């Protein structure tokens, strides 16, 4: 929670329209357990991109979003990711469930719980959205990969950074263009 708060504070320092805004955080104790609460802007009228794609599938018999709307959403997705990376942050869990969209095709990236600074020594996130060059490791343990030594695995993680997000966003855009869930419809 502390890492997520630090990332959200950094992303909320500048005016941007592509990331959920951090407002405040505080600690509370309930039943002798401490809980960290994060207060963010209200997005109750927004849909996750996943919900938006389901709605579009139901509304459009051809399973296609109008090209002008699709172009607007993709442009906003790219601008949002460019902003996140300009702040030296990698999201590490880009997927339709972590992107919000409103009626005007504005987007907001949410859920920065797995985010980190650009140099990271681990890959986290949803494995279906990992780039193909990501070493397959079980859990957080860095077990030897058949093709990589432990030193090569460490070096590889440090290089992934932005590439991980770009690959994941490419899969999200593919899903958006086809209005079908990945991996049901593989690119």
Image (cartoon, rainbow, N blue to C red):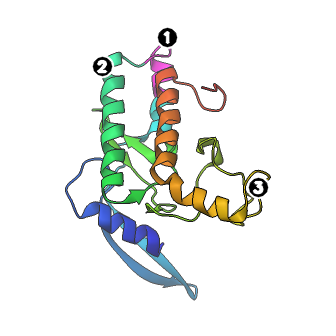
- Residue 59 percent location from the top left of the image: 45, 19
Q: Is residue 83 magenta?
A: no
Residue at horizontal 47 percent and vertical 61 percent from the top: 115
Element marked by disc 1: loop
Residue at horizontal 63 percent and vertical 25 percent from the top: 185
Q: Which residue is mark 2?
A: 68
Q: Residue furthest left?
A: 15
Front disc: 2 or 1: 2
**85 left or right of 95?**
left
**87 left or right of 142?**
left
Q: Quadrant of residue 37?
A: bottom left
Residue 126 shows in this picture: yes
Residue stretch rendered in magenta on the structure: 54-64
The answer to whether residue 4 is above or below residue 58 is below
Marks 2 and 3, Cα distance to the nearest angstrom?
A: 44 Å
Q: Quadrant of residue 71?
A: top left
Q: Nearer the viewer, residue 12 or 92?
A: 92
Tag 2 near tag 3, CB within 8 Å: no
**78 left or right of 163?**
left
Q: Quadrant of the C terminus?
A: top right
The answer to whether residue 127 is above or below residue 30 is above
Mark 1 Cα-neighbour bin, 10 Å: few <14, some 14–19, many ≥20: few
Q: Which residue is mark 3?
A: 145
Q: Earlier in the sequence, mark 2 or mark 3?
A: 2
Residue 62, numbered label: 1
Mark 3 Cα-neighbour bin, 10 Å: few <14, some 14–19, many ≥20: few
Q: Earlier in the sequence, mark 2 or mark 1?
A: 1
């Amino acid at each position: 929670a502390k890492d997520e708060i630090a990332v959200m504070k950094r992303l909320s320092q500048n005016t941007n329209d592509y990331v959920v805004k951090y407002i405040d955080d505080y600690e509370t104790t309930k039943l002798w357990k401490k809980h960290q609460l994060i207060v963010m802007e209200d997005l109750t009228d927004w849909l996750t991109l996943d919900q938006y794609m389901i709605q579009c599938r139901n509304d459009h018999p051809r399973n296609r979003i109008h090209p002008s709307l699709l172009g607007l959403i993709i442009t906003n997705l790219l601008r949002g990711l460019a902003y996140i990376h300009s702040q030296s942050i990698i999201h590490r869990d880009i997927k339709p469930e972590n992107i919000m969209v409103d009626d005007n095709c504005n987007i907001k990236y949410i859920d920065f719980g797995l985010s980190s600074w650009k140099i990271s020594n681990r890959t986290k996130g949803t494995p279906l959205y990992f780039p193909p060059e990501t070493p397959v490791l079980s859990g957080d343990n860095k077990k030897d990969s058949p093709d990589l030594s432990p030193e090569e695995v460490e070096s590889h993680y440090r290089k992934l950074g932005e590439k991980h997000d770009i690959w994941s966003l490419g899969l999200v855009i593919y899903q958006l263009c086809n209005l079908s869930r990945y991996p049901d419809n593989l690119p």
